[in-house]
Image (cartoon, rainbow, N blue to C red):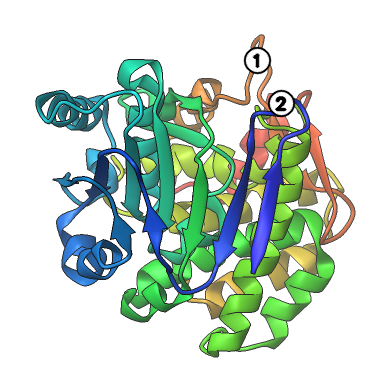
Amino acid sequence: MVIPIDIKSSESKKYNIYIEKLGRIEFSHKVAIVTNPTVSKLHLKSLLSTIEAPSVEVIEVPDGEEYKTIESVLSILDKLFSAKFDRKSTLIALGGGVIGDMTGFTASMYQRGVDFIQVPTTLLAQVDASVGGKTGVNNSYGKNLIGAFYQPRAVYINPLFLNTLPKREFAAGVAEAIKMAIMFDKEMFDFILNNTLEDEENIVKLIAKSVELKADVVNQDEKESGIRAVLNYGHTFGHVVENLTHYTRYLHGEAVAIGMVMANELAVILGLLSEQEAKVIQELLEKNSLPTTFVIDDIEEFYEHFYLDKKSAAGNIAFILPNGSIGTHTIKRDIPKESVLLALEKFKG
């Protein structure tokens, strides 16, 4: 299956997303595979068997969201310079969202930009993170605050990689698929609600539908000036949860699940979502082994973290919320602080 990315704002930004077993990939110049030790043991040999290139360098960075930093990117850059990579070289991201984000960001900077390819190995990366060209790293102020929009040359999604994925990582990917369904597609939500995701055929359908939705959004709005911001549903709250727990307690998808429940609480208070639909969403998240609770020690501190969110501008916090029912959305920038604090009170310790 091939899903095209064709960004309307730029004729030069066209590439394909392939959902299939990896085939032969040929390169005329040097290639660097960026991965981590966990993924390397599981999938590096398989990827290497598909690559034909003059030389292939393997660069490993430590595994974990806490290593998604500018220091890790600098270490990758140092290895590229040491190995004398040039502007015609290609980087390949073999791993989950962390590897993909860091590799893409590195590619955007190395000698002012080289090609990179995404080979996502987690469900979260396959349904969301590998598509659309968002790259970057975290810092002490928040998540992905240093980065660039930089599109890959191609994305190769091999569903067979998921056979080695831990259940917790798998659930984190389901959270991102549920996010897109709540915002854009009630039929997709019902599909997840009524089908087992342990079935291989259903997983391929979930990946394909998620990628189609993401591709359609990115084609319309590459740099998140409009509809693409809707994909951050659950993230405004979830990024605060990640930051307050120093990126060590929750996987990204788990934090997004908590963030969706918090966002839904606000939507209910504003009359945008019924309590029943909020309950259905929470139960679906829990059915898929995702956390839905979080204890906030200081709601004022939690609120202040919103101002570090990339979607906030001119002192206005952007909240992405369901709008009337599952499958619809709205972006609200004028919600009174009192309403937000009332929603956060539900999670206060």
User: What secondary structure is marked by label 1?
Assistant: loop
Identify the disc placed on residue 193. none
User: What secondary structure is marked by label 2?
Assistant: loop
Which residue was labeled with disc 2?
10
Tell me the quarter of the image containing the N terminus.
bottom right
The nearer-to-camera label among 2 and 1 is 2
Q: Relative to the observer, which residue lies in front, 258 or 331?
A: 331
Q: Relative to 276, is 291 on the left or the right?
A: left
Identified by mark 2, the residue type is Ser
Residue at x 34% of width, y 23% of height: 87
Q: Measuring from the top left, give residue 24's x and y in whole percent.
A: 40, 64
Q: Quadrant of residue 50?
A: bottom left
Q: Relative to 134, is 110 on the left or the right?
A: left
- Extreme right residue here? 324
Against 337, is 50 above or below? below
Real-space Cα separation, disc 2 to disc 1, in angstroms: 25 Å
Q: Quadrant of residue 19?
A: bottom right
Residue at x 35% of width, y 29% of height: 88
Q: Measuring from the top left, give residue 185's x and y in whole percent.
A: 81, 62
Identified by mark 1, the residue type is Ala
Which residue was labeled with disc 1?
313
